[in-house]
Image (cartoon, grey):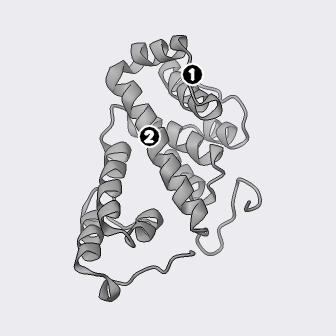
Amino acid sequence: MRLPILTETEMTPAQLAAHAATRAGKRGSVPPPVQAWLHSPDFAARAQAVGEFIRYDTVFPPDLVEIPILVTARFWTSHYEWFAHRRLAEAAGLDAAIIDAIRDNRDPPFADPRARVIYDYALTLHRTRSVPLCLHEAMVAAWGERGVVEVVGACGYYTMISMTLNAFDVGLPDGARSELGDWP
């Protein structure tokens, strides 16, 4: 990583507080993006709280919240984010054929139309930077206004995660290989 990973003995009181809040939260650990953000502890504290909400408290069940996360990781070719969230998506029960299709930029085989609209919305937003009214209305019909806000939030938050991981050159764990091809 291009920024040093701070040990607890090197952290300021504000950094320690952000670190402790992250570890005490639903994640139970301090993931690499937060390790980078600790160099700005106020930013780390605020950003990790948004991330905790996106991962654990949206209207989407655990398997479906992974769809916009994977779409975003793939869009940004964020190797670490893909590596981490592929495993989380599998553990949550998202079909491997869907995950592989997202990885390979193919149309995933969704049986659930509510999962399909999450994918279509996230992919369209990333690719075109807008969403046609008919897709927006389909997302609202499937998930309500809360759902449409939260899918946009997931795409935005994981864009920030992907940019953090890419900008600070966060590598994969030892022995892991990227499924997304060579590092950019």
Q: Is residue 7 above or below residue 104?
A: below
Q: Is residue 20 above or below residue 130?
A: below
Q: Position of residue 141 (x, y in %)?
A: 41, 13
N-term mark: 2 or 1: 1
**What residue do we see at 52% from left, 60% from top?**
164
Position of the C terminus by quadrant: bottom right
Quick one: label 2, few (<14), some, or many (20+) residues within 10 Å?
many
Quadrant housing the N terminus: bottom right
Distance from the alpha carbon under mark 2 to that under mark 1: 22 Å
- Pointers 2 and 1 in contact (C-beta within 8 Å): no
Side (left or right) of 13 relative to 4: left
Numbered badge on residue 162? none
The residue carrying mark 2 is 154
Q: Secondary structure at mark 1?
A: loop
- The kind of residue on which mark 1 rests is Ala
In the rendered picture of this protein, how many numbered marks are placed on residues? Answer: 2
Q: Is residue 13 left or right of residue 58?
A: left
Q: Label 1: which residue?
A: 111
Residue 24, picture quadrant: bottom left
As helix, strand or loop, the secondary structure at mark 2 comes to helix
- Residue 145 is situated, as x and y percent measured from the top left of the image, at 34, 21
Q: Picture quarter containing residue 106? A: top right
Q: Is residue 2 visible?
A: yes
Q: Residue at x 32, y 26 (%)?
A: 146
Residue furthest out toward the right: 182
Please, what is the three-letter code of the amino acid marked with disc 2? Ala
Q: Residue at x 52, y 22 (%)?
A: 117
Q: Nearer the viewer, residue 85 or 148?
A: 148
